[in-house]
Image (cartoon, rainbow, N blue to C red):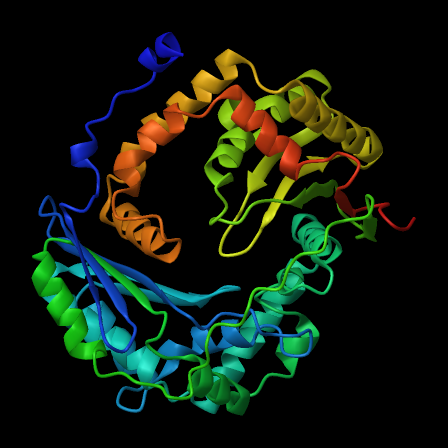
């Protein structure tokens, strides 16, 4: 163990974000603000989220949170659409907002001297949107076009079917951008009602990183958001439990006129709060990410020549996201690809990983950390994650030691806990799938 650890990268953890360089302030209205100074460039970045996601949606109104978030910057009670973008372009800034399952996220960037302008604009669009009917109609039409394109994309269709098959009646089965049928029925009044109810400071996170003294950044954010209240804002909906699979359900979707099939196979993985999350993430890197997509890339693509692409992913968030494998294959290779992927997952679970695989991937996880945190954007995202998932302000300073402490048995046990080749959902979309 000592010899293996000696081969891992050694980082100066004092250079990483930590309690010494991060300032945190929780306001009485529930908003949590984090700030870190970086004067190596004249810019400043803000990143954050509001507790206004799609978790409470149904098939009838799926896409409501997404449409609402997209419409925020189409006009406010004090700024028409054109003036919002004149303000952004006038200072060379950026600001974008989008909704996911659990939250509506935002990110922005400007020169440090313009932070107050950017914060004022952010506050205005999230608190006082006017949702002009003509703009909501235009956005809905754009989203319907995007959904029509999505519904003809083999990878997207396979993923949608996989989520439905794996999660059943759980909210994770629904796409946050909705369906053509649900989005087509959304109105500006529905958008207004959702904003009035769901948007508020409770559960809101905001990270500011850049060439601004941290205390001043906290004060600037509090000045524009500290008086926000929404007595109608509900508590976050409880996360329903996920029912395990009784077998290996499969769904084939025929999409004529395509040149390849895309398939997805997998099971429910850990949430970001799960103590095994980091171990599972390292195991996933070995299985289908590292180098030329790990073991799966070597076995399925390089040796067998069955796939144009193959990779695995693990996407745990507040709830248990999927641990899955995605592959693009020729129609004639679908069945063999399914079999070979499940066989390799079985070997991964039963046989574990080699000492070399473990040390290579530990070195990869530790060595890439400074690259992930070299930009203001990377640090701001890290601060939000530390707060959202209750990781502690010293998480990244402890991270190298935690990764170095993972053993082969840890990886094997995590894989056995979440991956069972005979209990996996399988979907495929493309020519010949589910039809002739």
Quadrant housing residue 238: bottom right
Along the horizontal axis of the image, is 102 left or right of 181? left
Q: Residue 344 at what x, y percent from top left?
A: 70, 24
Q: Is residue 279 above or below residue 208?
A: above
For the point 54% across and 29% down, which residue is it?
Answer: 283
Image location (x, y in percent) of residue 284: 55, 32
**In this picture, is 370 found above or below 151?**
above
State how many labels appear.
Answer: 0
Q: Is residue 196 left or right of residue 343?
A: left
Residue 212 x %, y %: 9, 57
Observer-nearest residue: 98 or 389? 389
Q: x%, y% of residue 339?
A: 80, 29
At x 49%, y 89%, the residue is 193
Residue positioned 19% across, 28% down in the render:
12
Q: Let me know if residue 368 appears in the view.
A: no
Does residue 127 appear in this view? yes
Q: Residue furthest top?
A: 3
Task: Give the vertical position of 334 relative to 79 (above or below).
Answer: above
Horizontal relation, residue 108 to residue 159: left or right: left
Image quadrant containing the N terminus: top left
Q: Is 436 in front, or is 279? A: 279
């Amino acid at each position: 163990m000592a010899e293996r650890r000696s081969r891992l990268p050694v980082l100066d953890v004092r250079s990483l974000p930590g309690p010494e360089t991060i300032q945190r302030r929780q306001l009485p209205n529930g908003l949590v603000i984090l700030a870190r100074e970086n004067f190596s460039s004249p810019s400043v970045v803000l990143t954050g989220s509001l507790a206004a996601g799609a978790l409470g949606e149904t098939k009838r109104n799926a896409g409501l949170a997404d449409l609402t978030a997209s419409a925020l910057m189409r006009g406010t009670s004090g700024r028409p659409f054109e003036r919002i973008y004149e303000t952004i372009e006038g200072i060379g800034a950026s600001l974008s907002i989008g909704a996911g399952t659990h939250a509506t996220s935002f990110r922005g960037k400007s020169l440090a001297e313009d932070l107050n302008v950017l914060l004022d604009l952010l506050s205005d669009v999230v608190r006082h949107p006017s949702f002009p009917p003509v703009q909501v109609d235009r956005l809905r039409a754009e989203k319907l076009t995007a959904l029509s394109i999505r519904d003809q994309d083999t990878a997207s269709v396979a993923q949608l079917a996989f989520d439905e098959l794996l999660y059943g009646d759980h909210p994770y089965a629904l796409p946050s951008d909705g369906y053509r049928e649900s989005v087509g029925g959304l109105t500006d009044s529905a958008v207004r009602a959702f904003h009035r109810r769901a948007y508020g400071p409770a559960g809101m996170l905001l990270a500011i990183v850049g060439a601004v003294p941290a205390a001043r950044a906290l004060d600037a954010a509090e000045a524009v958001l500290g008086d926000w209240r929404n007595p109608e804002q509900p508590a976050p909906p409880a996360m329903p439990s996920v029912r395990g699979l009784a077998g290996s359900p499969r769904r084939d979707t025929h999409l004529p006129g395509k040149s390849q099939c895309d398939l997805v196979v997998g099971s429910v993985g850990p949430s970001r709060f799960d103590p095994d999350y980091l171990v599972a993430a390292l195991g996933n890197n070995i299985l289908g990410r590292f180098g030329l997509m790990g073991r799966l890339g070597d076995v399925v693509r390089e040796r067998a020549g069955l796939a144009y692409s193959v990779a695995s992913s693990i996407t745990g968030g507040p709830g248990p996201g999927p641990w899955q494998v995605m592959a693009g294959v020729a129609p004639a290779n679908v069945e063999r690809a399914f079999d070979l992927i499940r066989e390799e997952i079985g070997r991964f679970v039963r046989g574990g990983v080699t000492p070399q695989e473990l040390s290579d991937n530990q070195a990869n996880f530790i060595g890439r950390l400074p690259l992930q945190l070299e930009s203001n954007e990377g640090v701001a995202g890290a601060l939000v994650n530390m707060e959202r998932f209750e990781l502690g302000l010293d998480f990244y300073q402890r991270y190298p030691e935690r990764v170095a402490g993972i053993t082969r048995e840890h990886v094997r046990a995590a894989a056995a806990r979440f991956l069972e080749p005979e209990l996996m959902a399988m979907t495929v979309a493309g020519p010949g799938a589910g039809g002739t």
